[in-house]
Image (cartoon, grey):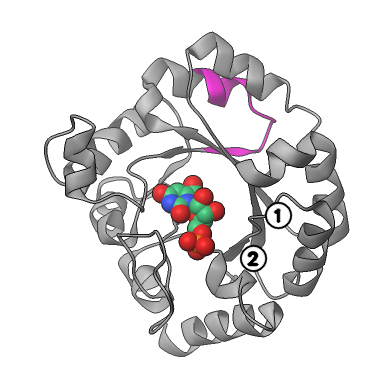
Amino acid sequence: MTNPVYCAVDTADKDHARALAARVAGRVGGIKLGLEFFMANGREGVATVAGESGVPVFLDLKLHDIPNTVAGAVRALAACPYDILTVHAGGGSDMMRAAKDAARPGAKVVGVTVLTSMDEYDLAATGVIGTPADQVRRLAVLAQGAGLDGIVCSAHEVAAMRAAWPEGVFIVPGIRPAGSDIGDQKRVMTPREAMAAGASILVVGRPITGADDPGAAADAIFQSLCQSL
Ligand SMILES: O=C(O)c1cc(=O)[nH]c(=O)n1[C@@H]1O[C@H](COP(=O)(O)O)[C@@H](O)[C@H]1O
């Protein structure tokens, strides 16, 4: 099977990111570089890590602004070698369409729905009444209508989302091997469970990057998937 595990390389330190990427490259399907890395190292940093690691790069910037601004931001990334880019689906249909239209040819643009660090109570505090599943469904419909390639959601919603959008790409963070520390995540599942539910890509950060041997930790996750599927 194609390795669906993407390692979230969450650090502002370019050399640490390069070292981590080197240790997991060949043992993951790709790496994810997010806001922490991008704020510190920008497009050149992304290009460096992408070029050295040779694996697909998921650039997780979670853009969320008016359509014109988001389109400009995405155009400014044109020379940046990303394969997947995130925007917040809550930015609305026009914003998502603008991002997709401005993206690099061939790159996937996916909409972040309800962060995996939030539960029903956190959602209610932002004025959204209902379950995370309700809100994910609402935003997935918007993302699909806007021409995005898929969504980011937790493993708890992915089965229903895939049933409604069979060709969608479903990126699932909040992945925790049994017994590992949950940290700030609230909607979590094990790698096996998330794949069985229909995830396309599993985003795994601290369970890999915090391990003594990140390469071995990534391997162990992939092996657990090969045994179960
Ligand atoms: O878009 C994301 O990747 C993302 C969305 C989401 O809802 N939850 C979430 O945790 N993430 C990212 O996935 C990674 C999870 O990291 P760990 O909790 O360390 O495995 C981080 O880089 C988050 O920014």
Q: At which x and y percent is residue 77?
A: 73, 28
Marks 2/1: CA–CA distance: 7 Å
Q: Amino acid at mark 2?
A: Gly
Q: Tell me how many marks there are.
A: 2
Residue drawn at 78 percent across, 44 percent down: 46
- Nearest the camera: 141 or 88? 88
Question: Which stretch appears magenta?
Answer: 98-109
From the viewer's perspective, is residue 73 above or below residue 62? above
Q: Secondary structure at mark 1?
A: loop
Q: At which x and y percent is residue 212?
A: 67, 83
Figure quadrant of the C terminus: bottom left
Q: Which residue is mark 1?
A: 56
Specify whether residue 181 is painted magenta. no
Specify whether residue 107 is painted magenta. yes
Residue drawn at 26 percent across, 55 percent down: 157
Q: At which x and y percent is residue 194?
A: 37, 69
Left or right: 201, with 73 as reference point: left
From the viewer's perspective, is residue 189 above or below residue 187? below
